[in-house]
Image (tube, rainbow, N blue to C red):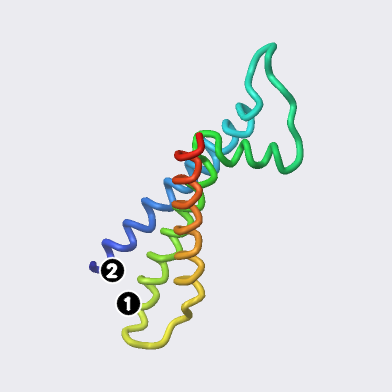
Amino acid sequence: MRLPTKRVLVGFIDALLLLALVGIAPFAWILRDGLGPDSVHSSGLDALRKAFLTFHAGPTILLLGGLHLLVSHAIRKQAQKGGRGSSVFLVLGTLLLLTAISVVFISLIFD
């Protein structure tokens, strides 16, 4: 993949990540306990877990964050042209992707 194509891909991933963080996550936090007279109040880790899995906002953010790190790492490696780059971004991106995919599959199985 050429470098300008990768930069466009990073821009697209960043736009989706921003939409997930600004558009989906706040609504997931508001809607986690329900609306109306039958809503319940939760706090602590239970509220965080509910918000994380509402609309699959948490796994989506993890997935997009992992993709961003992996594509950024590929751009950095291509810009260096053979120089040794840091593999921290590669490992972190891979871990985020695997975590997001695992959470999605587990929530689909046990829902």
Q: Quick check: 73 above or below 100? A: below
- Residue ID for mark 1: 78
Q: Quick check: 29 above or below 12? A: above
Q: Count the marks.
A: 2
Name the kind of residue labelled 2 in the image: Leu
Query: Could you tell whether 100 is left or right of 25 in the image?
Result: left
Name the kind of residue labelled 1 in the image: Gln
Query: Could you tell whether 49 is left or right of 76 in the image?
Result: right
Instruction: Assign a secondary structure to mark 1.
Output: helix
Q: Nearer the N terminus, badge 2 or badge 1?
A: 2
Instruction: State the residue at coordinates (48%, 71%).
Output: 91
Circle 1: is it few (<14), some (14-19), or many (20+) Cα within 10 Å? some
Query: Could you tell whether 34 is left or right of 89 in the image?
Result: right
Between residue 43 and residue 83, name the one nearer to us: 43
Q: Residue furthest front?
A: 110
Q: CA distance from mark 2 to mark 1?
A: 7 Å
- Residue ID for mark 2: 3
Q: Residue 14 appears at what percent x and percent y? A: 44, 52
Instruction: Assign a secondary structure to mark 2.
Output: helix
Instruction: State the residue at coordinates (62%, 36%).
Output: 50
Instruction: State the residue at coordinates (50%, 56%).
Output: 99
Is the Cβ of the residue at disc 2 closer than 8 Å to that at disc 1? yes
Q: Quadrant of the N terminus?
A: bottom left
